[in-house]
Amino acid sequence: MLMSNFLKNRKSIRDFKEKNVDKKVLEELMDYGRKLESNTANNNFKFILVEDGKLVYKALSGKGGYAGVMIKSPHYIALEFLDESDECIINASYAMESLITKASELNLGSCWINIVDVEEDIKKVLFELKNGKVDYLLAIGYPVAKNPFGQEGESCRLAIEEIVYKDEIGNKIDMDELENRGLSDLFYYIRFAPSSYNNQPWRFILKDDRIVLTLMCTDNKYSLVDAGIIMYYFENMAKSIGLNGKWKLLHDEGREVDKVFYKSIGEFYI
Ligand SMILES: Cc1cc2nc3c(=O)[nH]c(=O)nc-3n(C[C@H](O)[C@H](O)[C@H](O)COP(=O)(O)O)c2cc1C
């Protein structure tokens, strides 16, 4: 499927059939995951499949998910960070989104689940962790069919002008310039990427020769997971319009603009 269609139609699935996913399908998904682990520089994350979803649901009920609302699914995939570097979190979440794309090709629905605040001891036992850390899970399974006559809740998205700036944060972008440089579709579609609490903290600064991805600080932190996710979609959308670049990570301390903190995460030459 075209990446643009995929992005426009994708959404987080929170209602799953109780039916288990075929073993072969789970194996295909996890084989793909193993490839993602080994193809990533530093090999610093791992996907852990928990086939018995009941075990995870029971342990994390009232603890995992937004305000303890745990999502019930037949299986879960934990994303284990093997070190504490920014690069590890960005690489891991980039790869998780690639795994989600594969899951969708296999007709599986999915939803990220935040388990940052769950006690480390519970997570250690549940996912048999040694030195790594699990802050996010993916719920996976067959989605419950939607009522074709029902109103489906759509998550809202910021406008292009609210996430793309010219040369520096706050400088309005001219939509004609985006159109003339062949970048308007790219920015239109990547807005449909998922983000934690739907915060959409990504801000893009268009320069003459490159685009800088900057994260806005929300709730006193920079969500590097959201950065990794948007970098995945950006690269893939860029490829579909003939831009074959890759993000280069930047090591920025961050700065304040109009009482909001921002940190540059990466640059993409165009
Ligand atoms: C890192 C991350 C963590 C998330 N955690 C949760 C969660 O704990 N519970 C939940 O219901 N949705 C969670 N989501 C899903 C987002 O709320 C969702 O992507 C966003 O609201 C946009 O909706 P959409 O994915 O349907 O487009 C998470 C998404 C991301 C990217």
Image (spheres, grey):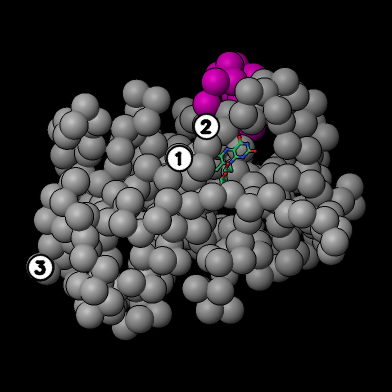
Residue that badge 3 annotates: 208
Q: Give the residues drawn in magenta, as a range.
A: 116-127
For label 1, being within 8 Å of ligand 1 is answered no
Gap in angstroms between the C-alphas marked 2 and 3: 37 Å
Q: Which residue shows up at 66% across the image and 65% down it?
A: 104
Residue that badge 2 annotates: 135
Gap in angstroms between the C-alphas marked 1 and 3: 28 Å
Q: Residues within 10 Å of mark 3 (few under 14, many from 20)?
A: few
Left or right for 76, reference 37: right
Counting from the top left corner in percent of width and height, residue 251 is at 17, 42
Residue that badge 1 annotates: 199
Query: Where does the C terminus fall, quadrant-wise?
Result: bottom left
Left or right for 230, reference 154: left
Left or right for 82, reference 80: left
Q: Residues within 10 Å of mark 2 (few under 14, many from 20)?
A: some
Instruction: Judge whether residue 126 is colored magenta.
Output: yes
